[in-house]
Image (tube, grey):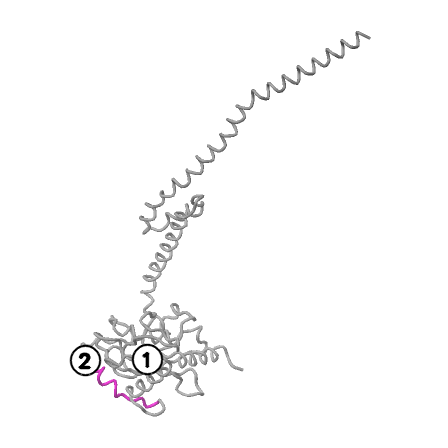
Amino acid sequence: MTSPSHRRLLKEASELASHPSPHFTAHPVSDSNLYDWHFTLAGPPPPSPYAGGIYHGRIVLPPTYPLRPPSFRFLTPSGRFEVNREICLSISGHHEETWQPAWGIRTALLALRSFMDADAKGQVGGLDVDVSVRRQYAVESRGWVCDVCEGRRSNEEVLREWREVCRAKGVAVDDDEGGASTLGAGAGGATANEGTTLVEAKSEPEQQPSDTNTNTETASSEQKSESLTSRDGVSPQQQVSAPVPSASAPAEAAAPAPTPTRTTPVQTTTTTTSRPTTTTTSDAPWLDRAILGVLIALAFMIVRRVAKSEEY
């Protein structure tokens, strides 16, 4: 019986093949072991010292994946990471507390590519070497050959063939500087800009407030437009939520604009209700005269009846 971990890895392998990225390719080393993957990764775009470089590495996944994170190591010299040593990232086994099961191999490779330009700062598996050395490693990395992968092809050959697959699936590829960037996306579903990646966990809190402010500003603008077009005024919910965003000073300044619209119907209602009052007062003398006339007629009839009864 296939375990949940096996099903997840098979799904990710299928997704990487059906929606390819020209920046990297990854696959299990053998069909009998889905927990040992190799990847070929293009370096970040210029002016990065890794631009034009093509790097090969290994991903080892735990049996409980995706509940626990994988580990990563580079097999190609880069000047950024030690060769064949597990590196410390927020998406790796060194920081299980920051790993999220929703992430996957695609997310991890995008993070690795983005993280290459960051400073090592004592990171486990990280290196700090001169920029000229890193550029030299980038040139040499293209001809590096993995002894484990089938076919024994160089990194450049692997990535070139993979980009032909991307083109066949409608993904536009720019081969300038080793094809470090992609210009668009086709029917295959790969994103045109893979730069929206997961990076170190410390950068995530900085993104969340930005997204929150954007949502609150959008909600504030929608509330403002509703209040401007409403004839009956602003609802209590809009009056409470409008002042919440800190960046909505223009919206708050424009809030009093609907006030004349709310007061006009009140004046009209007052005028209309006063008309029946005037009509009632003008009709009062006519009613009094009618009642008086009826009383006089009744009195006259009574007098005549009394007079006739006396004659008899």
Identify the amino acid type marked 2: Val
Residue 109: image quadrant is bottom left
Query: 70 or 281: nearer the eye?
Result: 281
Specify the quadrant that holds the N terminus: bottom right
Q: Which residues are magenta?
A: 134-148
User: What percent of the width, then of the height, locates residue 232?
Assistant: 45, 43
Total numbered labels: 2
Does 240 appear in magenta? no
Kindly report which numbered mark, 2 or 1, lies closer to the viewer in this rendering.
Answer: 1
Q: Quadrant of the C terminus?
A: top right
Q: Residue furthest bottom?
A: 151
Tell me the amino acid under the disc marked 1. Pro
Query: Is residue 136 one of those drawn in magenta?
Result: yes
Residue at 35% over, 56% down: 213
Among all residues in the image, which is located at the extreme top?
311
**Marks 2 and 1, Cα distance to the nearest angstrom?**
26 Å
* Residue in front for this viewpoint, 271 or 249: 271
State the residue position of label 1. 22
**In the rendered image, which quarter is residue 260 located in?**
top left
Question: What residue is shown with label 2?
Answer: 133
Q: Position of residue 299 (x, y in %)?
A: 69, 13
